[in-house]
Amino acid sequence: MKVVRLRNDPWEWKYTAIFSEKFNGEITNASDISQLDHFIYAAKFNPIFPTLIILSLTYLLILSGYLLLRKDTKKVTIFLLSLVAIYVLFGIVVTDSPTIGGRYFTVTFLTIGAINLVAAVLLSIREKNGGLICES
């Protein structure tokens, strides 16, 4: 199987090396391409590891937010709802991508958003019920 890399694919630079073009101007050599553009290229065509990176970063973000805000469940709920908005927005942005990575990331972002929404709703219900998720 042939390994295709962004550096070896000059016609792809126009579509994938967006950040390098914004920071450095026109891309003339493969050495002008930033690491962020390599991540985007990998996410487009070989999305397994970039998806794992996004999931790990999301876990760290949620854990950090919880640890910083755990004394006030209302703030944790607002934090989770803001993450819902961000991840749903990311999911909508990558929805139109024709690549397999775009489809993976759309599903990943929308799933993370849905999980955060459920967590925020459960926390809100628990706060209203005085610590219980369901009344019996």
Image (cartoon, rainbow, N blue to C red):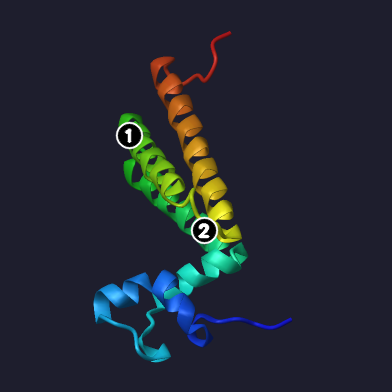
Q: Residues within 10 Å of mark 1 (few under 14, many from 20)?
A: few
Type of amino acid at the residue the image marks with label 2: Ser
Q: Residue furthest right?
A: 1
Q: What residue do we see at 65% from left, 82% from top?
A: 3
Dot 1: element: helix
Q: Residues within 10 Å of mark 2 (few under 14, many from 20)?
A: few
Q: Is residue 62 above or below residue 19?
A: above
Q: What residue do we see at 51% from left, 58% from top?
A: 56
Q: Is residue 89 above or below residue 1?
A: above
Where does residue 25 sit, x and y in percent of width and height?
A: 25, 80
Query: Image check: 57 left or right of 47?
Result: left
- Residue matched to label 2: 56
Where does residue 103 sit, x and y in percent of width and height?
A: 57, 52
Kindly indicate the quadrant of the structure image that contains residue 88.
top left
Q: Is residue 28 above or below residue 80?
A: below
Q: What residue do we see at 54% from left, 70% from top?
A: 42
Say which of 54 and 65 sits in front.
54
Say which of 22 and 66 sits in front.
22
Dot 2: element: helix
Where does residue 112 sit, x and y in percent of width and height?
A: 51, 44
Residue 114 has which mark?
A: none
Residue 78 has which mark?
A: 1
Where does residue 11 sit, x and y in percent of width and height?
A: 47, 79
Say which of 40 and 56 sits in front.
40
Mark 1 or mark 2, earlier in chain: 2
Type of amino acid at the residue the image marks with label 1: Ile
In which quadrant of the rendered image does the N terminus lie? bottom right
Say which of 135 and 43 sits in front.
43
In which quadrant of the rendered image does the C terminus lie? top right
Q: Is residue 104 above or below residue 70?
A: below
Q: What residue do we see at 30% from left, 76% from top?
A: 21
